[in-house]
Amino acid sequence: MRSRKILPAILALSAMSIVARAQQPSTESEVVDKVVRQEQAEVELLRQYSPLVETYIQNLRADKQLGAVPDGDKYFLGRAELAKGVDLEPLEHEAGMKQKVLGGFAGFFSTEFVPRGFLQMIFLDTNGFDRQHYKIEYARREFLGEVRCLVFDVDPLPKAGKGRFVGRIWVEDQDFHIVRINGAYGGSSLTSHYFNFDSWRVNAGKNQWLPAFVFTEQGSVRDEQTRKMRFKAFRAQTRLWGYNIGRVQGEQELSKILVEGLNPANDQSEGANDYSPFQAERAWARQAEENVMERLERQGLIAPRGEVDKVLETVINNLEVTNNLDIQPEVRCRVLMTSTLESFTIGHTIVLSRGLIDVLPDEASLAAILVHELGHVVLGHRMDTQFAFFDSVRFNEKETFRHFDFARTPEEEEAAKQKGNELLNNSPYKEQSSTAQLFLQALKNRAKEIPNLISPHLGDRVSTSLTIVAAVSSAQPSAAEAKPSANAIAALPLGGRIKVDPWNDQLRMLKSKPAGLLAESEKRPFELTPFVLYLTRQGEHPSTEAPNVAAKADSETKP
Ligand SMILES: [Zn+2]
């Protein structure tokens, strides 16, 4: 029975791939047709997804030494409703981005939908990317990472109308998906104003290329008539993730549990497995932590457990060991997916934002941040254990930041600072605390220019007070005054450490080569840099599809 069901499927598949190969286009015109069809299919395919969308904008002002430096910023977090085209629901209870932030979008962007304007840049043109509206000309071949691409220049035809794309596209040469869009939406003439953008899609399994990163840059623009500034120069990064969040997880987990159920765990009936009241209290608190983490993970706000958590936990371990701490239940670390710089602790779970980890120059600076949160744990600062009741973590997504607020009282903050100081003093990181000090100082200096980056959504802003390191460096009074070495980096640019998989939210440490000696203007602490991705092809979704296939096979064997 089983083999008869499976066999035709295999035959059908191989027949399809033969057909596909036979249909490989051979002329430029055929390739262009294929690219156009694939892009139309992409827009349709993306309709099933509601990824999270984050846009962070830094206004820039000229600086004699450094070129351009941040001068004000804006932050927006929302959920895309791609089923409705380019639609966006803000996730924050008060709008993160004021409506007329940029002083007016020219072209076809309405001012009221600035965040939508950035989301729009994941598509080339949803309303007429074809040969009736565009001239599409082959330019050359180029590798983006390990993906071989064909590069095309795209220009709107004169009759195509306003707001059309002008620029260049990179198309992978197996299925002809657009993987990179670089250009702008313009008016019908090149003199009217438009924003430049560079939009990247990443492979998430066989035939799926998901829009994930958009970099936007614009110089300042003056109004032709009035000579007034229309808007300041800015840079912006838009990130999308959480495409697969809440889609197959539940099913997957259940099938895993059902499989595990067939092999009962070791019989522990001889051990002491009843709970004392103390243990019950701890178990209750842990339950609350887990409910909150699970809820945030399902929303795409907390990354699934992975290698970055382990890195943080290793630092926590080093701090605990050298301070003779035996904390029960063990301290866990998780990562908040946002670019904002924030951290918080609930019970024995320490959470750092991806954005914060991204800008830390080294392990000692990471330790200086973690030790403060560990201070909250050691001091037993309480969390709201109502979250142990599952119904208390079920609420409308838009209420998230109002419902979950893990900020501490000023008294608790002060106490954690003191405790953190003490813990750091007993740790191996004490010796390298000058870089941590440099980091905190840089953050303090920049704070006024990046208010939205340092405004937390769930926890506390990073304490830039130097109490932690001041006491440490008192052993070497000169350290605090000493000028940093010529190539010391106080803080990395945004996105400097962690790679995000937009499909399943898995985080990995970036593996880039050391940059070598940097000019002062290249260091760009807390600043936005362009996205340049090393594109790769993935096989299937190893972690998501396999269990479903297994589950189907199982169900087929049932009588
Ligand atoms: Zn704190």
Image (tube, rainbow, N blue to C red):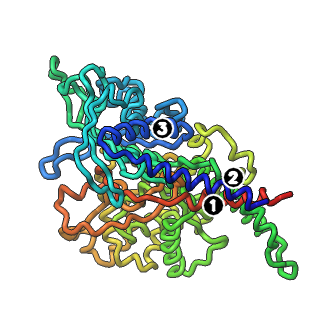
373 up-or-down from 188: above or below: below
- Quadrant location of residue 504? bottom right
Left or right: 460 in relation to 148: right
Disc 1 from disc 3: Cα separation:
25 Å
User: Considering depth in this image, is 19 or 234 the residue closer to the camera?
Assistant: 19
Kindly identify the residue that appears in the image at 48 percent across and 70 percent down.
311
Q: Which residue is mark 2?
A: 250
User: Considering depth in this image, is 183 or 310 the residue closer to the camera?
Assistant: 183
Ligand 1 within 8 Å of disc 2? The answer is no
Left or right: 58 in relation to 377: left
- In primary-sequence order, the first of circles 2 and 1 is 2
Ligand 1 within 8 Å of disc 3? The answer is no
Query: Which quadrant is home to the N terminus?
Result: bottom right
Q: Which residue is mark 3?
A: 41
Disc 3 from disc 2: Cα separation:
28 Å
Three-letter code for the amino acid on which mark 1 is drawn: Ala
